[in-house]
Amino acid sequence: MWRIKRPDLDNSKCTKCHLCWLFCPEGVVRRGSRGEVWIVYEFCKGCGVCAEVCAARAITMVREV
């Protein structure tokens, strides 16, 4: 693994605004048919853009273990 941090999504805080999906430069944030959001960690580079644009603070960057 080459990233230092990864996004951690708290779905209980998510407002389903989808800004994380819109701004993710790698396209690893996915949306379901009911608006649910998840992250495909396999391709995530850990840039933190998703956490920065999340007004609800549902995404935080945590250290990779």
Image (cartoon, rainbow, N blue to C red):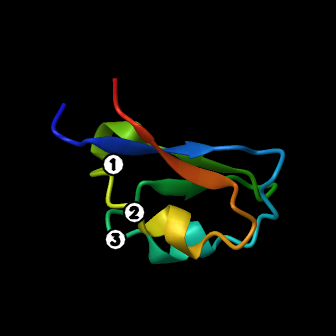
Compute the Cα span from label 1 to label 2.
8 Å
Q: Residue furthest front?
A: 63
Task: Tell me the kind of residue under disc 1.
Answer: Cys
The circle drawn on residue 8 is none
Query: Which residue is painted at 50% across and 65% down in the image?
Result: 50
Helix, strand or loop status at disc 2? loop
Res 21 seen here: no
Helix, strand or loop status at disc 1? loop
State the image quarter where residue 12 is shown: top right
Location of residue 43 with respect to 31 vertically, above or below: above
Residue 25 place in picture, x, y as percent: 34, 71
Work out whether mark 1 precedes mark 2 in sequence or the reverse, and give the earlier one.
2
Total numbered labels: 3
* Quarter of the picture holding the N terminus: top left
Question: Do the numbered discs 2 and 3 sit on residues whose CB atoms are within 8 Å?
Answer: yes
Q: Is residue 46 left or right of residue 57?
A: left
Q: Which residue is mark 1?
A: 44
Q: Nearer the viewer, residue 31 or 5?
A: 5
Residue 49 place in picture, x, y as percent: 43, 69
Q: Residues within 10 Å of mark 2 (few under 14, many from 20)?
A: some
Residue 21 place in picture, x, y as percent: 54, 67
Task: Tell me the kind of residue under disc 3.
Answer: Pro
Q: Which residue is mark 2?
A: 27
State the image quarter where residue 40 is shown: top left
The circle drawn on residue 25 is 3
Task: Tell me the kind of residue under disc 2.
Answer: Gly
